[in-house]
């Protein structure tokens, strides 16, 4: 690749720092941008963008590049956080990191970088972009064929971009990037996507980066490591109701359905019921898990045992689909995951109308959760995905 002007999103972490250095080594003109996406209480013990900016600025100093502090908090509040709250109020469990990537890091940030004269942007995500010639999407289809690697294609000579998994299987972040489109991918570089995390750390130490040993960030920026329920309490109303088990027995009281997610084990609030005179068998042996939510009746259902049938789903329906190529894949055998920390699972895809699709899995999936993302893969190629609307046995 010929030298270009590349604007790198420097987060203060080691991955984006090494990304900037790698681009320098390739001869690119590198400029750093630090994105501030949350305002209010970001200077407390849970989420400190101030500390992250100091780290990012220190990296820029070592590398000898410019860095700009840009505030995208208003965009984040309107495009990401508002949707986050709407989904929780509806009883679903959203994934704001997916929306943040599509709306902020690869839209607001990308637009800003282009205004600075960037030819490309780069981030520290563990993913890859592959440029392919010889096929391109010809437009939306309803159950028709569409071009895929190794499948039939058309428009010979056209260029398309594929989103690939990062080579480190433990760090691959393509799941969070599945809503990126052709225009966004055409302008994006993922320099560490070809490397294992151990090599990224080694490079950072060898070139003397100040954040070489900095702990990886976890959780959502605006929540950080703080108690999740305490945070939601600021924005969502409590409406207590009964917790019922699979035998129809009331075994406790929930604090509001918005504060629970399917598959949740901790914080349900039904431990120790046996000592308070609960029915025989309640509280014995296997742990309790959130299995269902009835929004109309304001009932939370909990079951005992990780492998309880209520926690297993063989199929799902999704909507609000976003496909990397610009149109839905053809119906057929692919693979998918319904949560980030999960291996790809073989499935059959059936595209539907108006951005919907269905997946039928070869093996039952655990705690498939409305509001989360179902992301579809063809080998290492991330095809896109959608928001889980419902799950079923088959």
Image (spheres, helix red, strand yellow):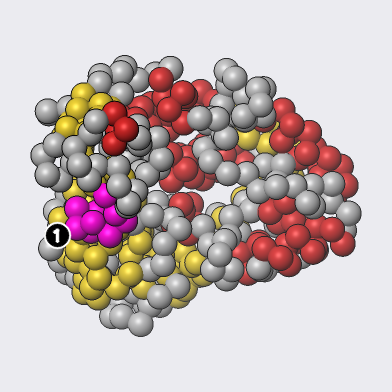
- The answer to whether residue 392 is visible is yes
Relative to 80, is 14 above or below? below
Relative to 170, is 319 above or below? above
Q: Is residue 257 highlighted in magenta?
A: no
Residue name at image x 58 percent, y 44 percent: 218
Residue 363, quarter of the rendered image: bottom left
Q: In this view of the protein, which residue sits in the foreground, 329 or 243?
A: 243
Is residue 63 left or right of 295 when viewed as pictured? Answer: right
- The answer to whether residue 355 is visible is no
Relative to 371, is 125 above or below? below
- Label 1 sits on residue: 393
Residue name at image x 61 percent, y 64 percent: 193
Residue name at image x 12 percent, y 28 percent: 297
Q: In this view of the protein, which residue sits in the foreground, 303 or 286?
A: 286
Is residue 135 left or right of 357 when viewed as pictured? Answer: right
Q: Position of residue 305 (x, y in %)?
A: 29, 54
Location of the C terminus by quadrant is bottom left
**Magenta-highlighted residues:** 304-312
Q: Position of residue 103 (x, y in %)?
A: 45, 39
Relative to 384, is 246 above or below? above
The residue tagged with tag 1: helix, strand or loop? loop
Q: Is residue 310 highlighted in magenta?
A: yes
Q: Position of residue 189 (x, y in %)?
A: 60, 58
Q: In this view of the protein, which residue sits in the foreground, 32 or 252?
A: 252
Q: In this view of the protein, which residue sits in the foreground, 268 or 295?
A: 268
Q: Position of residue 225 (x, y in %)?
A: 57, 35
Structural crowding at the residue carrying mark 1, measured as other residues with C-alpha within 10 Å and reported as few (<14), some (14–19) or many (≥20): some
Is residue 126 left or right of 150 when viewed as pictured? Answer: right
Location of the N terminus by quadrant is bottom right
Is residue 9 left or right of 291 when viewed as pictured? Answer: right
């Amino acid at each position: 690749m010929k030298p270009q002007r590349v604007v790198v999103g420097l987060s203060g972490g080691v991955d984006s720092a090494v990304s900037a250095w790698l681009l320098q080594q390739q001869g690119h003109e590198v400029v750093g941008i630090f994105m501030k996406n949350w305002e209010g209480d970001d200077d407390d013990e849970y989420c400190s963008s101030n500390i992250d900016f100091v780290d990012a600025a220190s990296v820029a100093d070592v590398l000898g590049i410019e860095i700009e502090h840009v505030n995208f908090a208003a965009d984040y509040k309107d495009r990401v956080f508002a949707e986050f709250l709407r989904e929780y109020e509806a009883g679903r469990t959203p994934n704001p990191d997916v929306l943040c990537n599509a709306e902020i890091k690869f839209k607001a940030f990308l637009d800003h970088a282009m205004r600075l004269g960037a030819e490309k942007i780069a981030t520290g995500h563990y993913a890859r972009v592959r440029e392919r010639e010889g096929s391109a999407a010809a437009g939306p289809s309803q159950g028709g064929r569409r071009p895929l690697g190794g499948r039939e294609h058309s428009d010979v000579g056209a260029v398309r971009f594929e989103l690939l998994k990062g080579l480190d299987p433990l760090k691959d972040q393509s799941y969070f990037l599945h809503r990126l489109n052709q225009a966004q991918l055409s302008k994006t570089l993922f320099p560490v996507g070809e490397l294992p995390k151990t090599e990224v750390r080694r490079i950072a130490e060898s070139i003397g980066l100040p954040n070489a040993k900095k702990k990886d960030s976890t959780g959502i920026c605006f929540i950080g490591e703080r108690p999740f329920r305490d945070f939601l309490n600021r924005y969502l109303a409590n409406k207590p109701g009964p917790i019922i088990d699979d035998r129809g027995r009331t075994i406790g009281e929930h604090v509001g359905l918005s504060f629970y997610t399917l598959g949740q084990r901790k914080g349900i609030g039904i431990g120790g019921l046996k000592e308070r005179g609960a029915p025989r068998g309640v509280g014995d042996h296997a742990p309790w898990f959130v299995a269902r939510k009835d929004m109309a009746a304001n009932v939370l259902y909990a079951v005992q045992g990780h492998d309880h049938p209520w926690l297993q789903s063989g199929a799902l329906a999704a909507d609000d689909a976003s496909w990397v190529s610009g149109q839905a894949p053809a119906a057929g055998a692919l693979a998918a995951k319904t949560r980030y920390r999960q291996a790809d699972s073989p499935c059959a895809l059936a595209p539907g109308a108006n951005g919907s699709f269905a997946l039928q899995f070869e093996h039952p999936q655990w705690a498939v959760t409305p509001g989360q993302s179902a992301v579809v893969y063809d080998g290492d190629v991330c095809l896109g995905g959608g928001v889980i609307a419902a799950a079923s046995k088959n």
